């Protein structure tokens, strides 16, 4: 289950909420850098068509979504 804490930035939080609503499972989540609130989430799913409004403050790098504000990462296990 995905745990979304207060230190997760808005763009990543919104995307995680969307993933939860679409029954995606988190295999791993950890804070990479506590000081900068940099999170890492591994999702057991293919990267799907993510709504455009959720992509405004993130970039796509192969099977990863990376926020522009804290460099948090959502990685999709199945490419």
Image (cartoon, grey):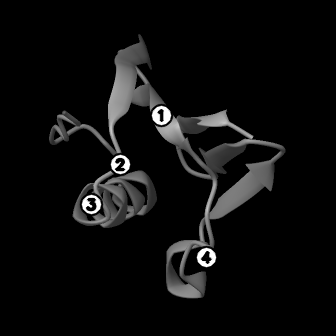
Q: CA distance from mark 1 to mark 4?
A: 23 Å
Mark 2 — residue? 24
Tell me the element at label 4: loop
Image depth: mark 4 or mark 2 in front? 2
Disc number for residue 17: 3
| Residue closest to the eye, 29 or 44 | 44
Work out whether residue 33 or residue 61 is closer to the camera in this orientation and state it: 61
- State if disc 4 and disc 1 touch (CB < 8 Å): no
- The residues tagged by marks 1 and 2 sit, at their Cα atoms, a distance apart of 7 Å
In this view of the protein, can residue 13 be seen by the observer?
Answer: yes
Question: Which image quadrant for residue 23?
Answer: bottom left
Whether residues under marks 1 and 2 lie with C-beta atoms below 8 angstroms apart, the answer is yes
Q: Earlier in the sequence, mark 1 or mark 2?
A: 2
Locate the C terminus by quadrant: top right
Q: Secondary structure at mark 2?
A: loop
Chain-order first, disc 4 or disc 3: 3
Across and down, in percent, residue 30 comes to: 36, 16
For residue 71, say whether it is visible: no
Nearest to the observer: residue 57 or residue 74: 74
Q: Mark 3: give few (<14), some (14-19) or many (20+) Cα within 10 Å.
A: some
Which residue is under mark 4?
56
Q: Dot 1 corresponds to which residue?
A: 44
Residue drawn 36% across the image and 21% down it? 29
């Amino acid at each position: 289950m995905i745990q979304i804490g207060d230190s997760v930035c808005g763009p990543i939080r919104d995307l995680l909420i969307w993933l939860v609503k679409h029954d995606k499972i988190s295999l791993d989540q950890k804070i990479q850098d506590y000081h900068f609130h940099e999170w890492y989430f591994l999702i057991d799913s293919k990267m799907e068509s993510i709504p455009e409004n959720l992509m405004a403050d993130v970039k796509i790098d192969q099977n990863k979504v990376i926020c522009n504000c804290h460099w948090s990462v959502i990685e999709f296990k199945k490419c």
